[in-house]
Each structure stands twice: as C-alpha cells, then as structure tokens.
Image (tube, rainbow, N blue to C red):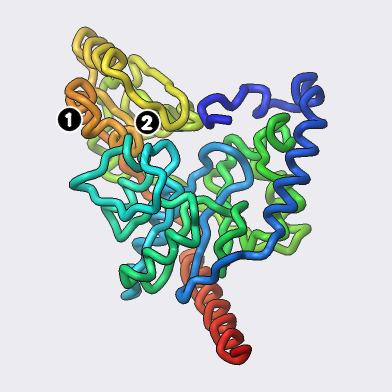
Amino acid sequence: MALDEAPPFWWDNPGWQAWLAAPLGFAYGRAAAARMDSEPSYAASVPVICIGNFVVGGGGKTPTVQLLVKFLKSNGLRPGVLSRGFGGAITTPTLVNLERHNAHDVGDEPLLHAALTTTVISADRPKGAAILEEEGCDIIVMDDGFQNPSLLKDYNLVVVDTKRGLGNGFPVPAGPLRVSLKRQMIHADSVLLIGDYDRGKRVVRKAARAGKPIFHADVKVKNKKQYKGLNVLAFAGIADPTKFFDTVEKTGAVIKDKQGFGDHHVFLEDECKDLLERARKQQLELITTTKDHARLRGMGDAQNKVAELAMPLDIDLVPDNPSMMDIILRTATERADQRRLQQKKSK
C-alpha cells in the first residue's frame, strides 16, 4: 500500500472499517512479526544504528537521522546512511550522487542525507551496507528498516510522532501498525517521542512496561525570525501536511493559502504552474518542507521554478536529554565490539 493512500480511519478510534479489516490485519501482523523475528543474513564490520518507526508513514525519521549523522561527524566518525530509496526508480544498490541523481532516481530523503554524508539506496540492506563499508564508512545509520531483519542492527531507535501516535492500534490494512506494538517493542532499544501531543501517552505506557528507555525531542525552526509576518502559500507532500502547516504558523508567518499532497508526492507540471499562479495572484511567498524542495529539483522547468521561489522550512530536532546521542553511540559501539569479538572466538 502506497503511503499516500493511507486511509483516514487509520488515525481515528477503531470503527467499523478497522474491525472489518481486522482479520486481515491479524494475519498480516503475524506474518510480519515472524519475519521480523528471523535471523539476520548479514552482520556488518561496523556498528549499525537503525532509525525506524512502528507505523506506516512519516514519524520524524529523517530529521532524527540527520541529527545523528551530524553528531557522529562531530565526534570524528565517518557515518554512512543506508536508505531503501522509497519512491525512486533505481532498484539496484546505488551510491547517491547529487550531481547525477534527482528524486525520481533515488527518492527524496537520500538527497537530503547525501548532502551531509555518504549515502546508499538499497532495498537489499546487506548489499547496501557492504557498499558503505567499501566506501570507508566506520558506522552505518539506517533510515527505516526496523522491521527488516536481513541486516544485523546494533541499536534500534524507534521514532514516534506524538501528533499522530499509533492511530487506531491495528496492523495494516486495518490500521497503520507494521507489526503489533507488543512484538515490535521487543526489538526496540529505545523510543524517541517527537512533540508533546497527547497521542504519545500510549506509547509511553507501552515502552515503560517493556522497560524501554524513552527520549523526547522537539522540532525547532532554523532562522525562525525570517518568516515572521510573511504572507505565504504553504504546500507539503508528507504523511501529515497539517503538522507542517502548524509549524509554519508557529514561526509567525501567515498562511493565506495552502495545499496538501500525499506522502512522497511527485509534483506534476500543472500542479507547479497552479502553485506559481496562486502565489502570483495573491502576492504570497511559497513555503514548503525540505523534502518537498528536494523532490522538486531537476524534475522539470515548472518544478525547478517552484524550487527556486519556494522557501524550504529548515528544521532541527532538539532532544531534551543532551546525552541521548552519546548513549546511543556508546551502546551501539559496545555491542558491535562484542559481536566482533565473538566472531573471532568462533573461528
């Protein structure tokens, strides 16, 4: 199921639609859990940290990956990002090149990651990890792949958007969970709650019962003052465009017009011309997410024009606990050292 086709009832209290699809969700959840529990087929020679989520759709993985990558680089490491490359046309393991690839080729998140560090797209995670090792990366950060067992992970950080939470709590197709929460929680090393909305409370209770550490972070807009008082046309093609609109309004910008698209939306020429015309007629500034901005570039004349005129709302993720990244890195490194030592002893 495409992420932009996620039905609205997934995010409400369980109703007749969820209960009707519940048997399929139960069967899917059992099969997905069995796969998640299977043994990895490949162990990298370097630590592997996975940033995942419990549900289908966005939850804040991308800014979390970027935060971690910046932290690792500041500590003298050479991180490599491993992404599935969702939405990209390239299906073979590929080292992302910003001069050659666009969102049509590799998807949007890999373009953002490649601007920071070595990035590989690969649905086959072991093959992608091997490329990053060959490139000299001394630690691997997985963008998604928490439910994929093929590559051994030294640390699983699961990100939760507290505005959306876990939806109705049912597995796909009855709800947004990829696997039942109880089974997924077994594999999580810690949970990162983004924002302070009420829908994060259920996750806190479940994580606490499972004895999992809980971290918290908030989104902070960079150079916030530059947006204050601007009249804008805001548009976004992410899992929850309303979250983006809320963030724009918190900067002091005034949303006079807005347009939401499906997650990972591929912008068509006519859509871009419409955005440009609406902004021109109303004398509005265009503003969008960094993902959408990356997805527009190199996709056509109208798309490039929108990318040229639109302001990408650049954000940082700010953890409450300044030691969060230290804890994650230390734990992942210790586990990687232990497994490498065990491998040597078994030879």
Q: Name the residue tied to disc 1.
A: 308
**Residue pictured at 67% horizontal, 60% vertical:** 187
Name the residue nearer the viewer: 49 or 164: 49
Circle 1 Cα neighbour tier, 10 Å, few/some/many (<14 / 14–19 / ≥20)? some
Name the residue nearer the viewer: 276 or 246: 276
Report the disc number at residue 248.
2
- Residue type at numbered disc 2: Val
Using residue 336 as the reference point, say whether residue 259 is left or right of it: left
Query: Height in image: 75 above or below 117?
Result: below
Circle 2 Cα neighbour tier, 10 Å, few/some/many (<14 / 14–19 / ≥20)? many
Q: Secondary structure at mark 2?
A: helix
Quarter of image, res 36: bottom right
Name the residue nearer the viewer: 148 or 186: 148
Query: Height in image: 193 above or below 227?
Result: below
Query: Height in image: 298 above or below 259?
Result: below
Numbered label tally: 2
**Residue pictured at 46% horizontal, 52% vertical:** 143
